[in-house]
Image (cartoon, rainbow, N blue to C red):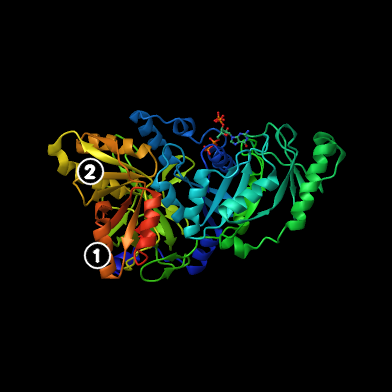
């Protein structure tokens, strides 16, 4: 480590750092579109006093009805940077909420963001139950055994039977549900929730969705006005389900929660701002403070005083006039201080960072300091890639920030054949930003683009035109999914390569991949070549 690098930060005491680490909770929301993620985000910020009036979280309507019109995309992207990371205080804690792009802007970034959090909040629309995108996002959470808090939303509407919902979560997502609260009524008759361990009822008051009100609480739940609101039949059915829940209820185990095997479940309405503070209370009480992270050298504990961090997302062209790119870095240990020098490990270069950004409730702000669990935004002129590690001099690379197998594929058709060099360069560079991936099949000279969200194809076409002066269109191609190929047994690999030749390709990083024409084909190949590993992620 150079002496210069070392003196750039003031002495950080281990005690002060441990205190800052213990305070932090870094999480993301996983949900299917329309389950209420944006509404929940808004209300969390309201509780965090990061916004005064609900409605300040931008990008609400625009990103829900995004069209192919670039201007709206550009605006949306401009907006979404401000909501990419939101930091706010809650009680004596500092909460970092990382946005997981969800609607048209759903992409690999959504998955990769989950590698940068210590826990996640799963939102389930009470009327719909477990939906497809939630299942996928949960699979990503499983890779790191991320602890999950669950919130059943929209209790102010008619929802499905709560017991049935919990069984569905358990069966589909393979996670044990432990309700902390139990709903009393729903829809027009939503009275509130009964807290199972506190033996208290928290009363829901309609019409206070945009403000913080002190909730009325009562001991127990059996009150004449509650009986009257529900009617005899519904009250009896509430009592019956409560009894069933209490009978079957296992004790909540923090250990099982931290291992991602058990999830505490809360009920409420994000729109009605009811249950949101219970989410925050649960988060600060049970969710882990910044965890340690694996590197190629050793495990880095958050409480180590030397600064380290990794880049998990790059967002380009937020401001069309500046064409700047922001690299989002998760601080893993130590402290970032304005003006400090850090080592960009892949390039082996020291860089002085004077202008990192933080994103407090929608404003980009110049940042003075940041601690483990925090996210900082680094200005990037093309030198920073996803997965890059930054340290105070130590040679190490964080692992576990993968590429995910794309789910959608298109063949790139170039309008002007003379521009093929520019096209390759453009695709390569855009894929380094991480929202799409490029594949080069061995059988022909095609270029195949892979993405997780469909809008990414349009973004690429637009950016190729604007930034690389290349015009291209996309054609459908019969690829269902892709797997990265590893095999230590050279003979087996050669045999596989001969057989699979027409389906093999190299990805943007030069790694061997198998482009499966169908899931059935993939399964057959996996069965036929057990020595070959078909991986659905690749480390950077
Ligand atoms: P998303 O980010 O997960 O996609 O969901 P978002 O918060 O945008 O919510 C989707 C729709 O569900 C919105 O209605 C929102 O108001 C509604 N919603 C969210 N939470 C609740 C809730 O607790 N109760 C009820 N009844 N509705 C809820 P919209 O009509 O599509 O849009 P908007 O006009 O309200 O913005």
Q: Residue furthest left?
A: 418
Q: Residue furthest right?
A: 224
State the image quarter where residue 528 is shown. bottom left
Label 1: which secondary element: helix
Q: Can residue 505 be seen in this view?
A: yes
Count of labels shown? 2
State the image quarter where residue 388 is shown. bottom left
State the image quarter where residue 248 is shown. bottom right
Q: Quadrant of the N terminus?
A: bottom left
Of tags 1 and 2, which is closer to the observer? 1
Label 2 neighbourhood size at 10 Å, few (<14), some (14-19), many (20+)?
Answer: many
In the image, 489 versus 99, the foreground residue is 489
- Seen at 83% across and 38% down, the residue is 233
Residue 234: x and y, percent?
80, 38
* Residue ID for mark 2: 426
Label 2: which secondary element: helix
Mark with earlier residue (1, 2): 2
Residue 410: x and y, percent?
30, 40
In the image, 234 versus 10, the foreground residue is 234
Question: Which label number is shown at residue 494?
Answer: 1
Label 1 neighbourhood size at 10 Å, few (<14), some (14-19), many (20+)?
Answer: few
Q: Is residue 322 visible?
A: no
> In the image, is the residue at mark 1 within 8 Å of ligand 1 by its beta carbon?
no
Reply above or below: 334 against 53: below
Residue 308: x and y, percent?
39, 62
- Seen at 43% across and 61% down, the residue is 332
In the image, 293 versus 16, the foreground residue is 293
530 with respect to 174 (left or right):
left
Residue 438: x and y, percent?
27, 47
For marks 1 and 2, give the CA distance.
32 Å
């Amino acid at each position: 480590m150079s002496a210069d690098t070392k003196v750039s930060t003031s002495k950080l005491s281990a005690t002060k750092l441990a205190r800052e680490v213990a305070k932090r909770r870094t999480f993301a929301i996983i949900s299917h579109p329309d389950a209420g993620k944006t509404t929940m985000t808004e209300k969390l910020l309201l509780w965090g006093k990061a916004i005064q009036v609900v409605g300040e979280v931008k990008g609400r309507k625009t990103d829900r009805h995004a069209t192919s019109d670039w201007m709206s995309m550009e605006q949306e992207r401009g907006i979404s940077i401000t909501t990419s990371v939101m930091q706010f205080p809650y009680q004596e804690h500092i909460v970092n909420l990382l946005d997981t792009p969800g609607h048209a802007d759903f992409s690999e970034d959504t998955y990769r963001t989950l590698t940068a959090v210590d826990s996640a909040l799963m939102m389930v629309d009470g009327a719909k139950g477990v939906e497809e995108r939630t299942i996928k996002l949960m699979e990503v959470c499983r890779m790191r055994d991320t602890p999950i808090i669950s919130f059943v939303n929209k209790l102010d509407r008619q929802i499905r039977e709560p017991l049935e919902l919990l069984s569905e979560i358990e069966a589909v997502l393979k996670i044990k549900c432990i309700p902390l609260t139990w709903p009393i009524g729903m829809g027009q008759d939503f009275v509130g929730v009964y807290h199972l361990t506190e033996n208290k009822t928290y009363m829901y008051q309609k019409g206070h969705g945009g403000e913080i009100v002190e909730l009325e609480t009562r001991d127990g739940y059996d009150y004449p006005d509650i009986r009257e609101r529900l009617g005899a039949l519904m009250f009896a059915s509430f009592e019956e389900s409560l009894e069933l829940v209490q009978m079957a209820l296992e004790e909540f185990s923090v250990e099982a929660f931290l291992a991602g095997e058990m999830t505490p479940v809360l009920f409420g309405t994000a729109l009605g701002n009811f249950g949101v503070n219970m989410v925050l209370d649960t988060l600060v009480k049970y969710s882990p403070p910044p965890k340690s992270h694996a590197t190629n050298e050793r495990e880095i504990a958050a409480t180590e005083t030397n600064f380290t961090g990794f880049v998990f997302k790059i967002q380009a062209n937020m401001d069309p006039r500046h064409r700047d790119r922001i690299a989002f870095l998760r601080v893993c240990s130590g402290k970032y201080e304005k003006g400090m020098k850090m080592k960009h490990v892949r390039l082996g270069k020291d860089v002085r960072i004077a202008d990192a950004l933080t994103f407090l409730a929608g404003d980009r702000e110049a940042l003075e300091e940041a601690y483990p669990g925090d996210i900082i935004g680094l200005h990037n002129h093309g030198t920073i890639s996803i997965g890059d590690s930054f340290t105070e001099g130590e040679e190490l690379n964080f692992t576990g920030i993968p590429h995910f197998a794309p789910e959608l594929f298109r063949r790139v058709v170039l309008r002007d054949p003379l521009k093929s060099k520019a096209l390759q360069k453009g695709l390569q560079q855009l894929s380094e930003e991480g929202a799409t991936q490029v594949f080069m099949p061995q059988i022909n000279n095609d270029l195949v683009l892979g993405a997780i969200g469909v809008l990414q194809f349009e973004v690429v076409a637009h950016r190729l035109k604007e930034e690389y002066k290349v015009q291209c269109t996309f054609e459908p191609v019969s690829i269902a999914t892709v797997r990265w190929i590893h095999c230590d047994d050279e003979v087996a690999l050669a045999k596989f390569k001969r057989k699979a030749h027409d389906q093999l390709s190299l990805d943007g990083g030069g790694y061997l991949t198998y482009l499966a024409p169908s899931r059935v084909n993939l399964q057959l190949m996996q069965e036929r070549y057990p020595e070959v590993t078909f991986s659905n992620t690749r480390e950077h």
